[in-house]
Amino acid sequence: MKYFEQDFLNFFKELEENNNKNWFDENRKRYLKIVKDPFNNFVTDLIAELSLDDNITMQAKDAIFRINRDIRFSADKTPYKNHVGAIISAMTKKDNFYPGYYFQLGYEGINLAGGIYQADKHQILNFRTYIANNLDEFQEVINDKKFVKYYGKLQGEKNKIIPKDFKEIAKKEPYLANKQLYYWTELDKKHIISDNIKELLIEYYYAAKDVKDFLTKAVLNN
C-alpha cells in the first residue's frame, strides 16, 4: 500500500529552505494533507501489524513526535524538524530508556533505530547485571546474521570507569562498559514513496526483534 506521495518529500525539501513559522503557516493545510494525516495512518497500520506478535497497545497519537522542535536550550532556533518520527513500544514515547522501534521519514531518507538510549544509573546497572549473567545469549543475539546484515552492531557511549564487579567480565564482553546500547541504520528516501514501505519497516523490525527483546529484559532485569 502506498502511504506517501512525492509531495511528502517535496514538503521537507522546501521546509529545509524555509524553516520559519510564516512559511509553515502558509503550508499548514498542505502539511496536514500530505504529511501529518498519511503518517498517522501509516503508524496506525504499522502498530496494528506489530501488535499481532508483540506487547504493543499504544495508539498512533502516543507514538508520534511533534514536528515542532524544542528550541529552549538549543543554539539552533529553527522551529521545525526536517522529518516526522515515531517510536513504537510497549511503553510511551517519553520512556526513552525502554527499547522500542524508532523511525523517522524526511527528504534525506529513513532512519531506523532501537535499543537503550537514555538509561539512568539504576537501569544501567540492571542491563549490565543481566548481560553478565546471560553472556552467551547476549552474544548470540547481537551476532545473529540477520541483525548484523540489517544493523551492523550495537552502538552507544561508554563509561570510562565501570564498577569493579564488572571489570573482569568486561574484558570478555566490552559492551558492559556501555551506558547506551542502541542500533541504527538509514534507508534511501525512494522507499518512502514506494508501495511496500510498511512491509519494509516490518522486515527491519523483526531483524532486530531478538536483540530488542533481550535488551528489554536486561533493562528491566526480569
Image: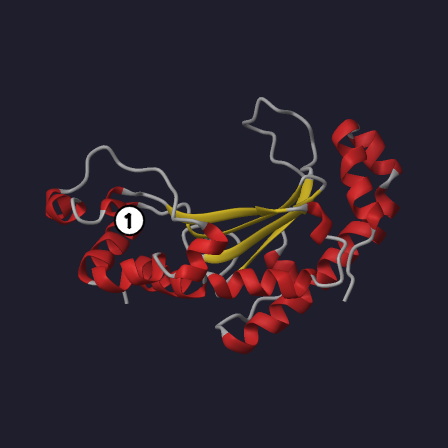
Could you tell me which residue is drawn at 52 percent across and 70 percent down? 56
Inspect this view and state whether residue 66 appears.
Answer: no
Could you tell me which residue is drawn at 30 percent across and 52 percent down? 123
Nearer to me, 38 or 155: 155
Inspect this view and state whether residue 127 appears.
Answer: yes
Q: Residue furthest bottom?
A: 52
Q: Amino acid at mark 1?
A: Ile
Q: Is residue 18 above or below residue 90?
A: above
Q: Is residue 54 above or below residue 136?
A: below
Numbered circles on residues, count: 1
Is 152 displayed left or right of 171 in the figure?
right
Decide: few, some or many residues near mark 1? Use Cα within 10 Å; few <14, some 14-19, many ≥20.
many
x, y (%) of residue 108?
68, 39
x, y (%) of residue 37?
78, 57
x, y (%) of residue 132?
19, 56
Which quarter of the rendering shows the C terminus?
A: bottom left
Q: Kindly identify which residue carries mark 1.
A: 124
Is 138 displayed left or right of 5 in the figure?
left
Which quarter of the rendering shows the N terminus?
A: bottom right
Could you tell me which residue is drawn at 24 percent across and 47 percent down? 176
Q: Residue furthest top?
A: 75
Q: In terms of secondary structure, where does tag 1 sit?
A: helix
Could you tell me which residue is drawn at 49 percent across and 47 percent down? 184
Choose top left, top right, bottom left or bottom right for residue 61.
Answer: bottom right
